[in-house]
Amino acid sequence: MAPSTSTETFSRIDSWWRAANYLSVGQIYLLDNPLLKTPLSFDNVKPRLLGHWGTTPGLNFIYAHLNRVIKNHDLDMIYITGPGHGGPGMVANTYLEGTYSEVYPTISQDAEGMSLLFKQFSFPGGIPSHVAPETPGSIHEGGELGYALSHAYGAVFDNPDLIATCVVGDGEAETGPLATSWHSNKFLNPVRDGAVLPILHLNGYKIAGPTVLARISHEELDQLFRGYGYTPHFVEGDDPAVMHEKMAETLDVVVQGIRQIQHEARGNGFRSRPKWPMIVLRTPKGWTCPSEIDGHPAEGSWRSHQVPLGSMHANQEHLEVLENWMKSYRPEELFDENGRLRGEIAELAPVGQRRMGANLHANGGALLRDLNLPDFQNYAVDVPQPGRVVAEATRTQGNMIRDIFKLNEETANFRVFSPDETASNRWGAVFETTARCSTAEITESDDHVAADGRVMEMLSEHQCQGWLEGYLLTGRHGFFSCYEAFIHIVDSMFNQHAKWLKITRQIPWRRPIASLNYLLTSHVWRQDHNGFSHQDPGFIDHVVNKKSEIIRVYLPPDANTLLSVTNHCLKSRDYVNVVVAGKQPALQWLDMDAAIKHCTAGLGIWDWASSDQGSEPDVVMACCGDVPTLETLAAVDLLRTHLPNLKVRVINVVDLMKLQPPSEHPHGLNDREFDVLFTTDKPIVFAYHGYPTLIHRLTYRRSNHRNLHVRGYKEEGTTTTPFDMVVLNDLDRFHLVLDVIERVPHLRAAAANLEQKMRNKLIHHKQYIEEHGEDLAEVKNWKWRTSDEVSATKNGE
Amino acid sequence: MAPSTSTETFSRIDSWWRAANYLSVGQIYLLDNPLLKTPLSFDNVKPRLLGHWGTTPGLNFIYAHLNRVIKNHDLDMIYITGPGHGGPGMVANTYLEGTYSEVYPTISQDAEGMSLLFKQFSFPGGIPSHVAPETPGSIHEGGELGYALSHAYGAVFDNPDLIATCVVGDGEAETGPLATSWHSNKFLNPVRDGAVLPILHLNGYKIAGPTVLARISHEELDQLFRGYGYTPHFVEGDDPAVMHEKMAETLDVVVQGIRQIQHEARGNGFRSRPKWPMIVLRTPKGWTCPSEIDGHPAEGSWRSHQVPLGSMHANQEHLEVLENWMKSYRPEELFDENGRLRGEIAELAPVGQRRMGANLHANGGALLRDLNLPDFQNYAVDVPQPGRVVAEATRTQGNMIRDIFKLNEETANFRVFSPDETASNRWGAVFETTARCSTAEITESDDHVAADGRVMEMLSEHQCQGWLEGYLLTGRHGFFSCYEAFIHIVDSMFNQHAKWLKITRQIPWRRPIASLNYLLTSHVWRQDHNGFSHQDPGFIDHVVNKKSEIIRVYLPPDANTLLSVTNHCLKSRDYVNVVVAGKQPALQWLDMDAAIKHCTAGLGIWDWASSDQGSEPDVVMACCGDVPTLETLAAVDLLRTHLPNLKVRVINVVDLMKLQPPSEHPHGLNDREFDVLFTTDKPIVFAYHGYPTLIHRLTYRRSNHRNLHVRGYKEEGTTTTPFDMVVLNDLDRFHLVLDVIERVPHLRAAAANLEQKMRNKLIHHKQYIEEHGEDLAEVKNWKWRTSDEVSATKNGE
């Protein structure tokens, strides 16, 4: 027996555990009669039995024990439930500790409240079956498995006093993201960060099949976690009394270990990566449920994964089994006759915000402080006239990011995340003020790597996303920069986060958190080094399927617009902001004033590029994205040179959601505004960064949709020149000119020469690059000219 | 020195390695002058330097050594290059061994061919910079990292004589999918499967940052791989002579170890999971490139990741460095004056199909045997009339899958893959003939688990996808069954496979492989247990962005149509087939004859449900997916009961791609056919399984698109009843009736009563489920009635 733990305490822990188990079973099965004051009848049982028992008693066991150590050691701790299926358990424990009733007063701590607690679970109009945003104390849904540990590490970064206890189910442990997230300890600095206490919960089965980690030898398990850099502690068994002792003793050792690591590091500075403790807890699946049901094993078997006992409305025997099962927890010892947890058991819980359900870190918005942002206009690229100056948009943005680090050094509430692409994505300036984070070995030749770096680089988009989510959910700020194509790796994580945000916006006690910001760069059009496998602009398509109140998508065409968008995103709350921008040297279009105006509007006519002043245009040329903007303007240049009477209107779109009707997205232009810009009857040639169908999908209800022709990525590419990439996808200036000619019938005759010229240009381009391996000089060196310059040179063309 | 290896052999290995390195550098830099017969000039260097040197010399080193062991031990081996960036290396080696020139005769084994070899690399009109489908001997692109080991294991399943050597870069090793794929050894049976030889290649850096596994202690590395169940062998250093010896010795030991494991298992039967050998190879990044460039370390540094030496057209000194670098490989010793590899070096390579570039397993279509398929009609559900019989579609399909296992037992070329959902997805019948595969510990209470099971279940969609891809790419067949929402986890893997297929179809020597078949079930509408986090029907949206010649999407409305579609998919080649079908008991619509006809057409009018016979309908009610079909027919039932004069045409869509114009997809209906079905001017109320915008996106060019109104999932859900789910998303029968009334103006007056009735139904539904937790009896028990039955009961309504 752990010397510090009295028999009385063990009894209290066991009582708490039984109470939580009782409430969990009750939630899964009962409609009413919560205290079993009368024999169970068919009517007391829910019509549909939904939920998962298998993992729940283990989660309850851990929660009960954590209560003790939190109280004993005055710990600041949150509980991350990898097995989200254990929803009834988390609800039960937060109900027992009182937080549940505080946020949901109708679910009171008495028989009436308990009855509602039971009924609402997985019931229409009630609460979901999983740990969810509705669950106090949770920052992690666990509907989709794999991200528990990443969330836990994200939560404790820059939270030195916080411990995130993270239960990893042995099912979840088989996922890729979870398997690599153990390595997060190479990015945790005991001086400035808190601690994660991983508890691998082995109960042997996923749904029906055995789990990998439950079926390897003790020796291999031990080696695996030592190899991952932890010191594993094993707590294994099924006898509650023995297990309580083991668990209490182990938790004391482990908390002691964490404190010692922190004490040393904080006293002496970071010297080397410590071996953090972790726990392997092995208990039977469905622990404490009937050992057999209908002659089949239940406890300890895959049969207890969901609802071990069915046919509850026809089988009287099952009803009795259920009643006996619930009574095996001795509810009369746990709850007084009004259904309130008895005082001596309630004593186990910590008080106030030390209760895991009430810990503010799990409602991060409550702790959120605004970022101290520099004036983004300070980083403006000087653009005396459009299309003459060359700059790298993301490099410019990097200067701003660097200063955000500087300005928020003290609050330490900002980090950037990337799979080793911070420099490649041209945010190199950040290394003037911080470094890549690593607490593993650092060598002399490493480039800006330090144990206190704030740039989080692991070659795992899953880790970047998971860490960032954990960081945001606990009330901080961040940015994820990623190669555009590979952001699809986290499609499903994005889904879960967007769903989480959607729900939290409907929960009054959940405070808004900082938005999740993506910079997608190294994009489809400039994969010169990497080619086809690195080309996919479809993340936007994926994102816009989620609730419009959550989703924002920006494609700034140059550096100053990117700065303005960045500023906006970092101030926003509860969104997912997707920003797509190029990193290569590119022509700049707008000075800072124009950029701010343009980004505020979200889209607009570029008068300086248009030739329809004061009249209806012959054609609208719209563009969205940096490369399409370049090609559109180069096409306009050709058109105005060769067909000076053609009236072209140029529209650039920064905020993609402006294209949707306001009924579909809060940013949407109303139809009148849309018609004024895009006309109701003129051809529109739209050059778009991504898959063309997305533009159709956003605009199909607009009056002029029938005249809309979109060019974009059509899944053609390889390692080739930048211009050849647009040619392969018919998005180049020559094709765009041909598109215009085809759509303006009165032009056909006048444009015959130009048409032939464009076709010849395309042939010439093909021959030239296959011979020389580089783009035509006229393309590489093209710059925008003023109307006067065009007039002056026109005859020379 | 390994006793079996002579000095002469070492010299040959080293020469081969130098030759491969020489050719790799040449590909990255040179346009011509391949043998450096004249001093390098600026003109000899490519205008744009693209490609990655860093990992290449290590890959070349391994290839050279594998050549020796293949030849010595007569091994059947393929080479999987995790670091796809090592493209020039794989090209160089297959060129040296002759396979490259065999498939691309213009790239001959002489100076002229070498010149073309150099020029084509990452050059417009040439080959990509990565290991790619164009590379002989490859089944793995490695553009997106993480899947090398899964592919390797997939390749050796049921290939007992094959060894897949799999190089895992230390960058890739940080990804989640790779981190869990080490556990694939718990699914490898030495009796029937071949072997994977993983080589973890530590060179210290990803792009710019250090890698995790290169910066943990030797002890931790050793423990990690022992924990993963391997016996690690370390080969570390930078002195080529020493490293050659170590590598040769280690490879002999390791091959010996593999053979011994196989010998024992095949002699005695499978007893327990062996500890397979693996190699940790630590070499400098950019090994053998100049140690310093411009005063900065190059070899052994992150600076050698891509092209270590730039400014090649302005900096004469760099030109000399390059020339000296290339000459350091002593090309005159390697190639004769015509540029052909000298005979004594060429001797190192195995011959014929033992060459890794010529191994047919890496061109799996060449080995593909048709599946022996049962007659799918044998599994037909008896449907004497539509909408009266209840069956579970995927359970029916499971019977067919079971018999595919039986019929192909001997060829052993079929497996199914699922993250522990085979039973949950109702394919339980397969366990009558096979089991879940596990070579880890199996206990008594396990449910159908065996070391020779053919059902591959690991709770990692990445593993399922990766294994299946490897299995298909080596010429076998399979099916991946998955919860619909979580297939997004492999969005990005799907991208890469679809891109691979697109390219292989353009390569004459690549033979067609079996299609990748997805069954997506436990779909958005029936997540009764799991709720909102498990609801996402957007994989289809993601899929249709890829090339239409690759993509097929089917939503069979019932069991017989699912059987027909399944049969079709398993016979197809080079596609990705997405099949979405429900697993819950549901009404059946078509008997087998009708199902075959319907699936062959892909979509069609259901005459038996329509009331527009011989005339133009008032409204078209289209449906796609099982739940939308049910709700549509229930709505039709309400309409015909209450508005008997309304002419309704019911169209069901099985093959979603039929909706696109034929210019967009080969399955697309032409406009005339489309107009005949959907009319040119009548309202269409379309009930769709997924996000409604997809239907708009597919049909925006159709003449009647302006009258198309689509209902589908709009991201509303929780754990609730099946009918409440459709109500939450306005896809239910009552809403559909309201949609029809709203769109048929001459109905408004006549339908006023019905309209009110529908609104009352919706209110009543809400009250009822919140009280009772289950669906209205009239909904639960609803069945389709014949016209006569409707007439007979109408007055009673």
Image (cartoon, coloured by chain):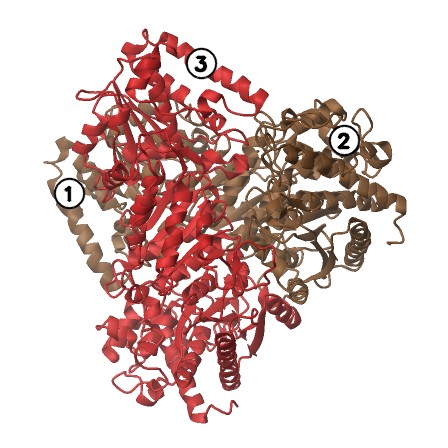
Chain colours: A red, B brown
A475 shown above or below A784: below
The residue where tag 2 is placed is B98
B339 shown above or below A433: above
Q: Quadrant of residue B143?
A: top right
Q: Secondary structure at mark 3?
A: helix
The residue where tag 1 is placed is B754
Q: Residues within 10 Å of mark 2 (few under 14, many from 20)?
A: many
The residue where tag 3 is placed is A759
Q: Nearer the viewer, mark 1 or mark 3?
A: 3
Calculate the distance from the C-alpha at mark 1 to the C-alpha at mark 3: 61 Å
Calculate the distance from the C-alpha at mark 2 to the C-alpha at mark 3: 41 Å
Q: Is residue A194 left or right of residue A91?
A: right
Check if mark 2's residue and mark 1's residue have beta carbons within 8 Å.
no
Q: Is residue A518 left or right of residue A220?
A: left
Q: Residues within 10 Å of mark 3 (few under 14, many from 20)?
A: some
B312 shown above or below A48: above
Q: Is residue A70 left or right of residue A216?
A: left
Residue B23 location, x and y as percent? 71, 34
Q: Secondary structure at mark 2?
A: loop
Name the quarter where the N terminus of chain B is drawn: bottom right
A52 shown above or below B163: below
Residue B67 location, x and y as percent? 79, 42
Q: What residue type is disc 1 on?
A: Leu
Q: Nearer the viewer, residue B122 or A788?
A: A788
Residue at image position (46%, 38%) is: A536
